[in-house]
Image (cartoon, rainbow, N blue to C red):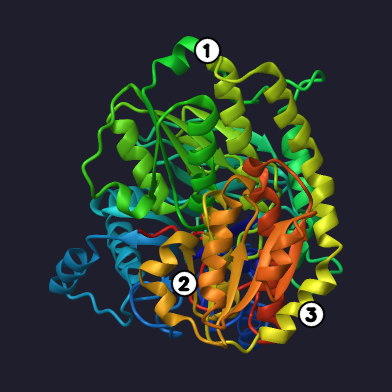
Amino acid sequence: MCGIVGYVGLQSPQNFLIDGLEKLEYRGYDSAGVAVVNEGEIKIRKAVGPIVNLRKVIGDEDLGGRVGIGHTRWATHGGVTVTNAHPHFNSDKTIAVVHNGTVENYIELKAKLQAEGVEFISDTDTEVACMLIAEHFKKLGDLKAAMDAATKEMEGTFVLVAVAADQPDKLVAYRRNAPLIAAKGKNFNFVASDFSAILKHTKDVFLIENGDTVVLTKDAIEIFDEDDKPVKRELMHIGWDVDAADKGDYEHFMLKEIHEQPKGIQETLSRSLTEDDRIKLYGIDMTAEQLNSYNKIIIVACGTAYHAGLVGQYFIEKIAGIPVQIDVASEFRYRRQFIDEKTLFIAVSQSGETADTLEALREAKKQGAHILSIVNVVGSSVARESDEVFYTWAGPEISVASTKAYTTQLLCLYMLALYFADLKGTIEPDDYADYVAQLKRIPSQIEEILKKEQDIERLAYDYYDRDQVFFIGRGLDSSVAFEGSLKLKEVSYIPSFAIAAGEMKHGTIALMEPRTIVIALATQDAIFDKTVSNIQEIKARNAHIISIAKEGNTSIVNHSNEVIYIPECRDELTPLLTVVPLQLYAYFVAKDRHCEIDKPRNLAKSVTVE
Ligand code: F6R
């Protein structure tokens, strides 16, 4: 999704901007550009494709100036062209604008401006925003006043950052329901879409609220709320180190992040357990009375986070006895919902900026639900708009394909369920203690699986050229099958399907043939025999079966062509382990197929459009 960086300081902005844009690359983009204000002129340089192309366009040129804005674009309005790339100019090139999000009424605004004689060269809504700001600037002579007047006319969710040729010491930014931070340095300041763009230079950031306008000079960050009153926003010191957003010795972020799972789980666990192994959720303070006042839970999320939610649904219902509804966020708002103050709404999101999830959260809040979120990015929109936040401490996830966020989301959901069960008195003390003890073993058990990396790499190599791969399982195994399938298709582009094993015989089994790969998850002891029957049906059609089972399960060998073992643990906790070989499998298949693993085609890390 689009990324924004703006700099005001004592030095020439271009390196800060391009450097920052490179750190935002993980969000996904198809073109990039910068604008610098220098001696009454705005210089814009843009290129389609990776940032290295922008570097080539600029070459050795020093754009000079002290104020600049940069942008990575993920095309929404208009194709991937240099003309459509940001920044955009107004007609006489005195204003330049970058933009993230969508201006929903841009067609009407464009028609109005065209009727006044304004000519457009791009297909974007951004150019419309730029022209509108410029029109107001002509009348008002002040960039902030022009931004305020223009944004009042715009509908949608967006961040806009503008510079003016005759205001060489400042930039103005505006936020409405899209991510924006302002970062404070000595003799310089930044605005950016997220922390990674600025971490190298400063770790002190203000979280900009909806409706805020920011005026940035080298010495000051002035923030005004939607009533135009100067406001102080929370200053946060970011704990992440710069290396967290670096590949280190790994070839890809995805592999690095798969390997970081034991650390992320350990970190999240240690922040949520007391010395005597009681679950104490930092950020969540619920009484039994409050929990008992909820008659249902709704979990809403997208993609991988939704798959984590499926496991959460199962475990909360099982041990806390609370009915849980789960929805993909993009569908949630378009069905009748039964929500009131007796509803506990749980949003799960790595980025905390996913538009679908945010909009679902806002709808649930409007209808009276209590909002609890499980989020990785501190201070993100989902976190800020929730009543309570339980952070996953996975660290920055750069690879577009989510891995460590998923396992830490699972862990948070397990802990939340145990916390609820304890509050409600639906779990025996021994059982509670056993679950906690087993959760504490998970990091070392994941390490055990990671030791099998070479075996999985070999397996991936043997079948990387197949046309389709199926993932099957029953119960919790089917939830992980969905995640395994998503991982494989997004990074390797192999068509892949996940299906509850028992459903195969109701239609999908028609697709089985000798070259078909079926990855069968068979870790649920309670329903193992049923899973084996389903595997047998497929094997009889000569498909190739790779099973995942718990160590010590010798019978599975008779039903499979290959078996990957995970360490022994309780049935309910296996998703934390079974997903790891699936992540590695997807990674190595994608590598064998020479795919762009960390930035798969057509995908963005943070999906801030609905
Ligand atoms: C898949 C993936 C996506 C995200 C989804 C939600 O690997 O990363 O499916 O899980 O876009 O994103 P967040 O968790 O940021 O709300």
Dot 3 lies on which element? Answer: helix
CA gap, disc 3 to disc 2? 36 Å
Name the side, left or right, on which 342 lies relative to 5: left
Q: Is residue 240 above or below residue 365?
A: below
Q: Are marks 3 and 2 in contact (CB under 8 Å)?
A: no
Q: CA distance from mark 1 to mark 2?
A: 44 Å
- Residue 62 x, y percent position in the rendering: 68, 78
Mark 1 residue's CB less than 8 Å from ligand 1: no
Q: Which residue matches tag 1?
A: 287
Among the 4 quarters of the image, the one containing residue 302: bottom left
Quarter occupied by residue 535 = bottom right
Instruction: Residue at 65%, 69% (x, y): give it.
Output: 559
Comparing 70 with 599, the one in front is 599
Q: Is mark 2 within 8 Å of ligand 1?
A: no
Q: Which residue is mark 3?
A: 458
Mark 2 neighbour class, 10 Å CA radius: few under 14, some 14 to 19, many 20 or more: many
Kind of residue sitting beneath label 1: Thr
Kind of residue sitting beneath label 2: Trp
**Mark 3–mark 1 distance (CA, rounded to whole Å):** 51 Å
Contact? badges 1 and 2 (CB < 8 Å)? no
**Sequence-wise first label, 1 or 2:** 2
Q: Which residue is mark 2?
A: 74
The local secondary structure at tag 2 comes to loop
Seen at 60% across and 42% down, the residue is 220
Which amino acid does the dot numbered 3 rest on? Arg
Q: Can I make out residue 15 in this image?
A: no
N-terminal of the pair, mark 3 or mark 1, is: 1
Kindly state the secondary structure of the residue where label 1 is placed. Answer: loop
Residue 7 visible in rendering: yes
Return the x and y of residue 414 as percentages of the image width and height.
61, 36
- Give the quarter of the figure containing the C terminus: bottom left
Question: Which dot, 3 or 2, sits closer to the camera?
Answer: 3
